[in-house]
């Protein structure tokens, strides 16, 4: 089945049905300030720093998920009690001495929060000494967006917190909103192709779709955990830039969307060629995405 299957209910529907995705209650608090025994914490702690304040806002959904798991909350409390590195971030030696969660759910929550803090959204926090990872890009999908913190760990709140500007731009254009509705109802390429008659509105939709796929890629209640390592590699990590570049270009997005139906075609090779020949201007960007996926995501179809 094509890529929309896992994401469309949590992506297209917020454009015309508010909060269509499932939700869960969020945990509260940031875990206190107690650290592991034997770790000497200076009086100036990470948890009360400007870096932590920025990271807490940038990673609000990850923080809430961690706070709901006692082991993860304890690890976060230890980290928050650590001193500061010269760049203003948490002292990495101290953080490494904190006991990581052993339970599966808590361990996943901790890994997600730490990934967000060190290489994800919080990597845009200048108070932590980071240069914004995507701040220099011209691709609106990757540029940091001025969004309010999420109020809880749900799919819709993830969209609002990570992709608000692109969401608003699509919501503000009835044509784009109609494309989202049309897209969510399609089961074949001809139907989806018919949705994309307005190039500008389709590009706005593709940008929002790409943003959600990158920053809220899961099918879990929070939409934050990719359902497979292959999806994580292609969308969230290794090939994120190429994926975003393709969704920032109408022709590349059209090739990608078309080709993802080809697995059901009688002649798969001819189907792929037809997708390319219909939108030749997108072949270079699509080729870059395809090359990254083949090279960097081994074992993925």
Image (cartoon, helix red, strand yellow):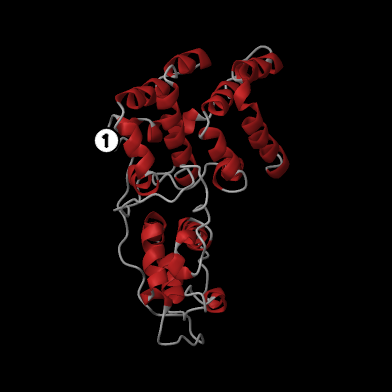
Q: Position of residue 73 (x, y in %)?
A: 40, 67
Left or right placement of residue 34 versus residue 29 in this view: right
Left or right placement of residue 246 versus residue 161 in this view: right
Viewport quadrant of the C terminus: top right
Q: Residue furthest left?
A: 18
Q: Nearer the viewer, residue 114 or 131?
A: 131
Q: Check disc 1 and report its element: helix, strand or loop.
A: loop
Left or right placement of residue 61 versus residue 19 in this view: right
Left or right placement of residue 232 versus residue 54 in this view: right
Look at the picture and state if 190 lies above or below 251.
above
Q: Nearer the viewer, residue 5 or 197?
A: 197
Q: Position of residue 255 (x, y in %)?
A: 58, 24
Look at the picture and state if 33 lies above or below 228.
below
> In terms of image quadrants, where is residue 64?
bottom left
User: Which residue is located at x 42 percent, y 36 percent?
Assistant: 208
Residue 256 visible in the displayed image: yes
Q: Position of residue 126 (x, y in %)?
A: 45, 66
Graded by Cα atoms within 10 Å as few (under 14), some (14 to 19) or many (20 or more), the crowding at tag 1 reads few
Q: Nearer the viewer, residue 138 or 146?
A: 138
Residue 71 visible in the displayed image: no
State the count of labels: 1
Residue assigned mark 1:
18
Q: Position of residue 124 (x, y in %)?
A: 47, 59
User: Which residue is located at x 61 percent, y 43 percent?
Assistant: 239
Look at the picture and state if 28 lies above or below 240.
below
Viewport quadrant of the N terminus: top right
């Amino acid at each position: 089945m094509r890529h929309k299957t896992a994401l469309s209910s949590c992506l297209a529907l917020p454009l015309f049905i508010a909060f269509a995705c499932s939700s869960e209650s969020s945990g509260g608090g940031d875990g206190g300030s107690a650290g592991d025994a034997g770790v000497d914490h200076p009086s100036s702690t990470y948890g009360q720093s400007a870096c932590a304040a920025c990271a807490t806002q940038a990673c609000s959904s990850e923080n809430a998920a961690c706070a709901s798991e006692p082991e993860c909350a304890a690890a976060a409390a230890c980290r928050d009690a650590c001193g500061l590195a010269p760049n203003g971030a948490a002292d990495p030696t101290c953080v490494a001495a904190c006991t990581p969660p052993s339970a599966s759910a808590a361990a996943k929550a901790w890994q997600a929060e730490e990934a967000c803090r060190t290489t994800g959204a919080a990597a845009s926090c200048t108070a932590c000494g980071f240069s914004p990872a995507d701040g220099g890009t011209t691709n609106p999908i990757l540029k940091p967006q001025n969004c309010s913190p999420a109020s809880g760990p749900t799919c819709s709140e993830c969209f609002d917190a990570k992709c608000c500007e692109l969401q608003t731009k699509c919501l503000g254009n009835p044509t784009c909103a109609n494309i989202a509705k049309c897209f969510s109802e399609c089961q074949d390429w001809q139907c989806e192709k018919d949705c994309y008659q307005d190039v500008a509105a389709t590009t706005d939709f593709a940008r929002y779709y790409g943003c959600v796929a990158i920053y809220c890629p899961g099918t879990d209640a929070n939409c934050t955990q990719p359902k497979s390592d292959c999806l994580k590699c292609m969308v969230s990590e290794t090939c994120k830039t190429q994926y975003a570049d393709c969704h920032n270009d109408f022709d590349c997005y059209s090739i990608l969307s078309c080709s993802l139906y080809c697995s059901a075609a009688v002649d798969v090779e001819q189907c792929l060629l037809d997708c390319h020949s219909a939108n030749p201007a997108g072949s270079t960007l699509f080729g870059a995405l395809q090359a990254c996926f083949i090279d960097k995501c081994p074992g993925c179809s």
